[in-house]
Image: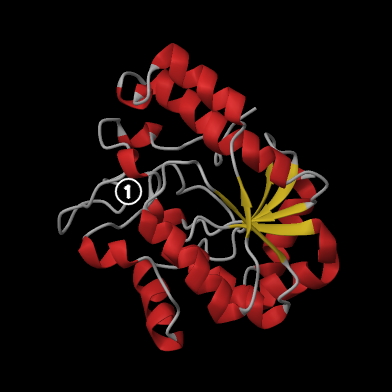
Amino acid sequence: MLSYTQELNNDFINLNPEEVLYHFIEKYKNKIAFSTSLGIEDQVVTHIIAGINKDTRLITLDTGRLFQETYDLIEKTNARYKIGIEVFYPNTADVENMVREKGINLFYQSIENRKLCCHIRKIKPLTRALQNMEVWITGLRSEQSVTRKNNRMVEWDPSFKIIKLNPLINWSEKKVWDFINLHKIPYNTLHDKGFSSIGCLPCTRAVAPGEDIRAGRWWWENPEMKECGLHNNKK
């Protein structure tokens, strides 16, 4: 599978995201899914997918700790593109047991606790969402963080055992915003308040001008630890 994804990277190196997404959506049809967290990159990918095939499967994870602005954006996006983003939730018993044992804000206490919370609220629901899928589309960009600088456009994800497609991997943040402004794509209003990367409310803060784009996520941790576990798992 690694050699296959390498071949695909070589084939698509000179193609734009629209061309790459069209190829995969046409080839994999009902075996391909896009997971969106409603970030600016994900909104760009949603816009492109909706222009190719509105029946393409779009999924998002409601961790139970999201900002209201994120929920508002789900509705705006569905209405704008006449689509239905599937919402997946964590298992109730898992969350209740975790909170009972570790506390409601366990993620501030240790990296292990934070990763446990991400596992229950994100990884397990995404595992369900990606069942029977062969390709997983993401909005990853290599310039987002030190943990993503080596990602490629087409990869094999060993944790979810699926082909992972990152069509915007080589885009700059400026290019993303230019695309959003050009096409008047709806985006999370928290971006206008200094939030650059938006996840769960207790784990996300606004960043100061000049700060790293991911500085507002899990700000109490070192940069090389700032992944929830959905991406860049090594097995």
- Secondary structure beneath label 1: loop
Residue furthest out toward the top: 101
User: Would residue 80 appear left or right of 26 to someone viewing this image?
Assistant: left
The N terminus lies in quadrant: top right
Q: Is residue 175 above or below residue 71?
A: below
Residue identifier under label 1: 214
Q: Amino acid at mark 1?
A: Arg
Mark 1 Cα within 10 Å, few/some/many (few <14, many 20+)? many
Residue furthest out toward the bottom: 182
Residue furthest out toward the left: 209
Q: Pinpoint residue 212: horizontal percent, then vertical percent.
A: 26, 51
Q: Pinpoint residue 68: horizontal percent, then vertical percent.
A: 38, 56
Count of marks overlaid on the render: 1
Q: Pinpoint residue 116: horizontal percent, then vertical percent.
A: 49, 23
Q: Is residue 204 above or below residue 58?
A: above
Q: Pinpoint residue 233: horizontal percent, then vertical percent.
A: 58, 34
Q: Residue at x 34, y 26 (%)?
A: 105
Q: Residue at x 64, y 77 (%)?
A: 50
The front one of 90 and 4 is: 90
Q: Is residue 35 above or below residue 48?
A: above
Answer whether residue 15 is visible to the viewer in this image: no
- Please say which color scheme the image uses: secondary structure
User: Would residue 154 appear left or right of 45 to someone viewing this image?
Assistant: right
Answer whether residue 137 is visible to the viewer in this image: yes
The front one of 27 and 108 is: 108
Q: Residue at x 73, y 46 (%)?
A: 130
User: Would residue 38 appear left or right of 106 to someone viewing this image?
Assistant: right
| Quadrant housing residue 235 | top right
